[in-house]
Image: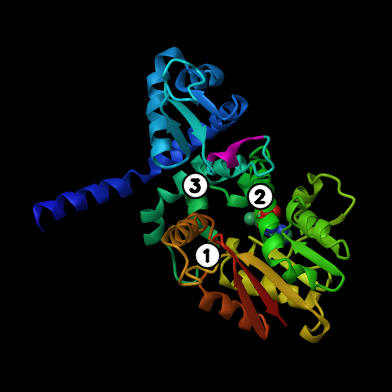
Amino acid sequence: MSSDELLQAQLELYHHGLAFVKSLALKAATDLRIPDTIHRRGGAATLSELASDTGIHPTKRSNLRRVMRVLTTTGVFSIVQGKGSNDHAGDGAAYYKLTRVSRLLVERSPHNLSPMVGTIVNTLCWTSLLKMPEWFTQGQEGESAQSHSLVQLANGCTFWDTTKVDGGLFNDGMAADSRIAMKVLLKEHGGAFGEVKSSLVDIGGNHGATASAVARAFPHLKCTVLDLAHVVAAAPASDILTFVAGNMFEYVPPADAVLLKWILHDWKHEDCVKIMRRCKEAIPAKEAGGKVIIIDMVVGYPVTQPNDSIEAQVLLDIYMMGSDGMEREENEWSLIFSEAGFSDYKITPTNGIRSIIEVYP
Ligand SMILES: C[S@@+](CC[C@H](N)C(=O)[O-])C[C@H]1O[C@@H](n2cnc3c(N)ncnc32)[C@H](O)[C@@H]1O
């Protein structure tokens, strides 16, 4: 290696190794409600305004500047030098503004995604993934992978156990994701839902954010949400949805179409086949309009998607590995569908990282 190559390699290695700092700076800014502060101050705030509004101790103000430097460098916020026409503080100080990323962290915004930051960046995930080397080298022949997921190895409980005691963070994160995802999917690819005859059941539909969006967009559809009893018990009342408490491995209520948004990526192959078999039992034949609509990732599909989209997909795959879930490539999806007895499928990629997969009996 030449000197330049050696130094470039060192730089890249440090860059990869320090990537976690970006996550933690994002989490700190979200928890300190910095996006809300900037928003409340009309879209721009100086460092001292941020510090006083968010209760930063005076001895730590210079440290806040360092965190904001990470977040402006990575595009979460932008920084504008004062003394210009926008020098609202009049003191020439730099001030911070929201970008399209941090606008998604403003609490009052209809697109508020801040609960997802806590869902993604948390101690459970970190402690689990730090166990990867140990987890990779453990295991016995014939042993179910489910019996010792990374989350279980590190925390002694399953991922789903933790969602019962997280103060609603996970459910809020799911609802926040659904509000944005469904707004775009229904606008750009609504036909997949509009052509459903008269009924749809959203499996693992959580508190109904996804199904509500579908029901409002297509009032001819009678929409039902199936989820675990404790999730349904905490769901807000709805006059457009019917909630059913149950276990998708045992029973799926009959409907013209079954919706699975961000469900199958939680489960390993054999479990997905079981869930899809239950779905097939619940819907009519293809000729009568029966189908399963999956909203999930198809990793690497289409091949033309930008590199940051593929990187987000493969990173999320490792996050899912913590609880024995996975993000799948097309051939892995196809195998699930054929083993569950489905005849055909159609993938519609969206501009985000997920696709709509329509699966026909
Ligand atoms: C990743 S969340 C997705 C929620 C929602 N579909 C969305 O995208 O916002 C998975 C959902 O599956 C539910 N779930 C987990 N196991 C289940 C089971 N055996 N039967 C029914 N629902 C289940 C969870 O309670 C949770 O609401």
Question: Which comes before the other along the chain, label 3 or label 1?
Answer: 3
**Which quadrant is the C terminus positioned in?**
bottom right
Ligand 1 within 8 Å of the CB at mark 1: no
Residue bearing the label numbered 2: 174
Which tag is nearer the camera, tag 3 or tag 1? 1
Check disc 3 and report its element: helix, strand or loop: helix
- State the residue at coordinates (69%, 65%): 260
Is 39 drawn above or below residue 127 in the view shown?
above
Residue 152 part of the magenta segment? no
Q: Is residue 289 visible?
A: yes
Span of residues in magenta: 102-107
Three-letter residue code for mark 1: Glu
Asked which colour scheme the image uses, the reply is rainbow
- Does residue 82 appear left or right of residue 120 in this picture? left
Q: Quadrant of ligand 1?
A: bottom right
- State the residue at coordinates (79%, 84%): 285
Contact, mark 2 vs mark 3 (Cβ under 8 Å): no
Disc 2 from disc 3: Cα separation: 17 Å
Disc 3 from disc 1: Cα separation: 16 Å
**Classed neighbour count for the residue bearing mark 3: other residues with Cα under 10 Å, few (<14), some (14–19), many (≥20):** many
Residue bearing the label numbered 3: 125
Residue bearing the label numbered 1: 327
Ligand 1 within 8 Å of the CB at mark 2: yes
